[in-house]
Image (spheres, rainbow, N blue to C red):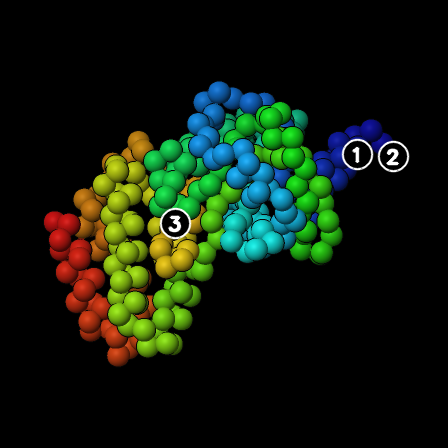
Amino acid sequence: MKPLLLVPLLFFLLMGCERTKGFTLKKITSHHTADPKWEVEQDLEKETLATYLQGPYTYLGSGNHTYAFESPDKKTVIKFFKQKHMRTSDFFLSSKTKKRREKERDDSFSSYKIAYEKLKEETGLLYLHLNKTSHLDTTLTLIDQEGRSLAVSLDDMEFYLQKKGVLALEYLEGLFQEKAYDKAILSVRSLLHLIATRNQKGLYDKDLQFFKNFAFVDGEPIEIDIGEFRNDVPIAPTYQELEAVSAELKQFIDKNAHEFSSIAHFVIDKDIESYR
């Protein structure tokens, strides 16, 4: 084979390796060194953390930024970051691509840190691990989408633990089917209050969508997508943000509980008005 053909062939092979569908350990393996700016003060007792990390954790799904696995009791998820969006060590990357990936990593990690330090209750976060460490000394068993067992050294991984809930619209739909409208209206109001709380803390959410980013845990709402928070972006007044996001909620109610629509619209509008 001619030497000139080796370069494009090598590039093709490298790119082909990245196209493996689904979860693989390679996709969550970080090659970044620890950075002090991503350290957070942990308040979870060592014994409690050890209980959460007993596993095995079973593959649950894939989001924009993470792969999620659920605990044996289905009450907790562990989410590992997709490293392909943040990898900068590949030799064939252009300077522009490296800078873009560095910024994406900084933006994402800043958001996770904001969530942990300022919105822990609102996001159901339990533990955040953004740097490689040596103190966990834990190997966690993961069950992938093919049912295979994989051993992961958590000290080497970037991940977070979060409470597992029922997606918000799925939860509301269940209440509608049960005709539990009193509970449904309280749940709708609690969702609006959750958003208002984050807004009033001066935090912006770039990806505010009810249908995939919110869940209920024991009847209380949390925001499960924590990768798009910003504290350096001007935010709209609380009532304006609530007006914008409530449109999706109203449409969902109109479609799934028409007989409940009038009272729901009235309560939603009244709650929003209280923030003027």
Which quarter of the figure is the N terminus placed in? top right
- Residue at numbered disc 3: 223
Amino acid type, label 1: Leu
Q: Is residue 32 left or right of residue 176?
A: right
Amino acid type, label 2: Met
Identity of the residue drawn at 49% across and 34% down: 45
**Foreground residue, 57 or 196?**
57
Classify 10 Å Cα crowding around label 1: few (below 14), some (14-19), many (20 and above).
Answer: few
Nearest to the eye among marks 3 and 2: give it: 3
- Residue at numbered disc 1: 5
SS at mark 3? strand
Classify 10 Å Cα crowding around label 3: few (below 14), some (14-19), many (20 and above).
Answer: many
**Foreground residue, 207 or 192?**
192
- Residue 2, percent from left and from top: 85, 32
Please tell me the numbered disc located at residue 173: none
Nearer the N terminus, badge 3 or badge 2? 2
Q: CA distance from mark 3 to mark 2?
A: 55 Å
Q: Is residue 177 left or right of residue 74?
A: left
- Residue 96, percent from left and from top: 52, 28
Identity of the residue drawn at 51% across and 42% down: 161
Amino acid type, label 3: Glu
CB atoms at circles 1 and 2 under 8 Å apart? yes
